[in-house]
Image (cartoon, rainbow, N blue to C red):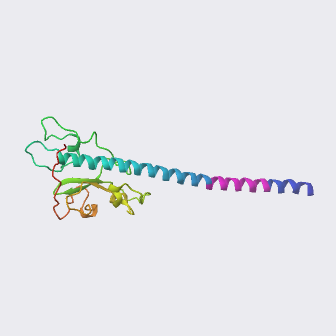
Amino acid sequence: MLRRAQPTRARGVVLLALMLALAIGGVAALAAMDVASLSRQRERELQLLFVGDQYRKAIQHYFAEAPAGASHVLPSRLQDLIEDDRFPMPVRHLRRLFPDPITGRDEWGLLQVGGRIAGVYSLSAQVPAKQAGFAPAYQHFSGRAAYREWVFAVAPLGATALPSPSAASTPATGTPESKPQWPERRSSP
């Protein structure tokens, strides 16, 4: 009987070593998935910063470029940015409408002033991984609790801060209470 006890102990040690190796492998796999998930989130954040800035620039361009004799206004819908029919030949301020990189949907929160679009923001309540180190134009994104607080908007003259999305009752219909002055068109030299 002593001879049989030795192989049983050896099998037990091998089984214990196998279980330990599986546990370590599982922990390593979870860590790798966590790193990959964070990497994907950071990539989506970079896309959001790029796309949001494209919308902000397009809104500013739409406002600045008005037909001769027409007043400078903000767009009333995002579609106006890709087909501005205020001109005899439609003008494109944006090549296409981009989906929100965070949610993956075509829907954006709209910051509206007087029923017109002054900016866009993600509808995601997810906490951003990036909390600091933003470009100077977006320093106000530092320490935000959700992507929906990253507002890409044109700023009115004399404003020290942009209106927040919470100033709007709903993403598509809310309007801030005060009427800002929008920048006058500046002609280039």
Residue 165 percent location from the top left of the image:
28, 60
Picture quadrant of residue 15? bottom right
- In the displayed structure, 86 sits above or below 151; it is above
Q: Nearer the viewer, residue 49 or 189?
A: 189
Residue 161 percent location from the top left of the image:
26, 63
Q: Nearer the viewer, residue 28 or 54?
A: 54
* Residue at the limit of the structure toward the right, as seen here: 2
Q: Quadrant of the N terminus?
A: bottom right
* Residue at the limit of the structure toward the left, as seen here: 69
Residue 130 visible somewhere in the drawing: yes
| Horizontal side, residue 82 vs residue 16: left or right | left
Number of numbered discs visible in the structure rendering: 0
Residue 188 magenta: no
Residue 1 visible somewhere in the drawing: no
Residue 137 percent location from the top left of the image:
32, 55
Query: Is the stretch drawn in magenta largely helix, strand or loop?
Result: helix
| Horizontal side, residue 174 vs residue 9: left or right | left
Q: Nearer the viewer, residue 88 or 122?
A: 88
**Point 20% across, 46% down: residue:** 62
* Residue at the limit of the structure toward the top, as seen here: 89
Residue 120 percent location from the top left of the image:
28, 53
Residue 26 magenta: yes
**Point 30% across, 46% down: residue:** 54
| Horizontal side, residue 78 vs residue 136: left or right | left
| Horizontal side, residue 126 vs residue 111: left or right | right
Q: Quadrant of the C terminus?
A: top left
**Which residues make up the magenta segment?**
13-27
